[in-house]
Amino acid sequence: MRILVIIPTYNERENIGEMIEKILSLNINADVLVVDDNSPDKTWEIVKEISEGNKHVNLLLREKKEGLGFAYRDGFKWAIDHKYDIIVHLDADFSHNPDEIPNFISKIKESYDVVVGSRYLNGVTVVNWPLKRLLLSYFANLYARIFTGVKVKDLTSGFKAFKREVLENIPWKEVSAGGYGFQIETVYYPYHMGYKVTELPIIFVERRKGKSKMTKKIVFEAFFLVLKLSLKRLFIKRYNKK
């Protein structure tokens, strides 16, 4: 099975080289795709240099920063076009431990369609977050779970794995979020389409270098997105697989 690890980046020059090296050292024979939003710190230069000497590393350079969701859309389309069977995505800043990637792949091979890396499956497994941010994240996920009807404890997780079929069949015309709400939508639709979704416990560690991309605008977008998805759930019983 062909495996692709997607890493979205924006000003991750301090982290990306080490992250790529770590993923390539795993015994999973995976390729890497970095989707960079034309980072002012020229993260893409490092990726381009690595890719020129390693056929397993690829760069998708976007014109500008439009939001995490749009970067992922382009990355998923690239993965589908290049016929990868399993697509994993995680953050570049080591808040997601790349050593967990083989566990995600094992779950997919067990017959699951979507695997979510969960910070809240076994209690709370978040390191170095201020209490305010932790409470916001925890209760935001509780709110999302209740209103979307998706029985996943960490709907906003940025560490996931998909079978290609899932990404081919998500109704992308209905996916609207540009920020972290995109993470909710990419679980909401597969779940209500009847795909097998599971969670895998992970330990989330606050980024080691660089700055967080979280903003109030992203939080509000996710809040109202959940309300919209809740209404869809009331009027549309089920999304069908193609």
Image: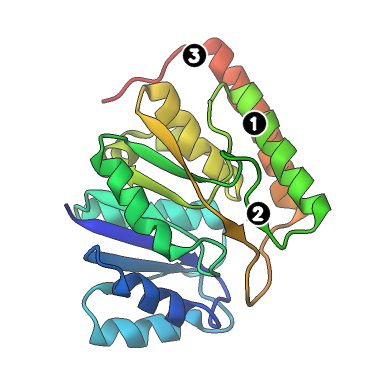
> Disc 1 residue type?
Ala
Q: Is residue 163 above or below residue 26?
A: above
Residue under the point 47% across and 35% down = 187
Q: Which quarter of the rendering shows the C terminus?
A: top left
- First in residue order: circle 3 vs circle 2: 2
The image position of residue 128, as x and y in percent, is 72, 63
Q: Is residue 37 left or right of residue 58?
A: right
Q: Observer-nearest residue: 105 or 91?
A: 105
Q: Residues within 10 Å of mark 2 (few under 14, many from 20)?
A: some
Q: Is residue 203 left or right of residue 51?
A: right
Q: Is residue 166 above or below residue 95?
A: above
- First in residue order: circle 3 vs circle 1: 1
> Disc 2 residue type?
Val
The image position of residue 91, as x and y in percent, is 51, 62
- First in residue order: circle 1 vs circle 2: 2
Which dot marks residue 144?
Answer: 1
Q: How many numbered marks have been drawn onto this rendered protein structure?
A: 3
Residue at the far right: name it. Answer: 132
The image position of residue 194, as x and y in percent, is 36, 22
Which dot marks residue 236?
Answer: 3
The residue where tag 2 is placed is 126
Q: Is residue 82 left or right of residue 194?
A: left
The image position of residue 90, as x and y in percent, is 46, 59
Is any part of residue 24 visible from this angle? Answer: yes
Q: Secondary structure at mark 3?
A: loop
> Disc 3 residue type?
Ile
The quadrant holding residue 190 is: top left
Q: Observer-nearest residue: 89 or 76?
A: 89
Q: CA distance from mark 3 to mark 2?
A: 35 Å
Q: CA distance from mark 1 to mark 2?
A: 19 Å
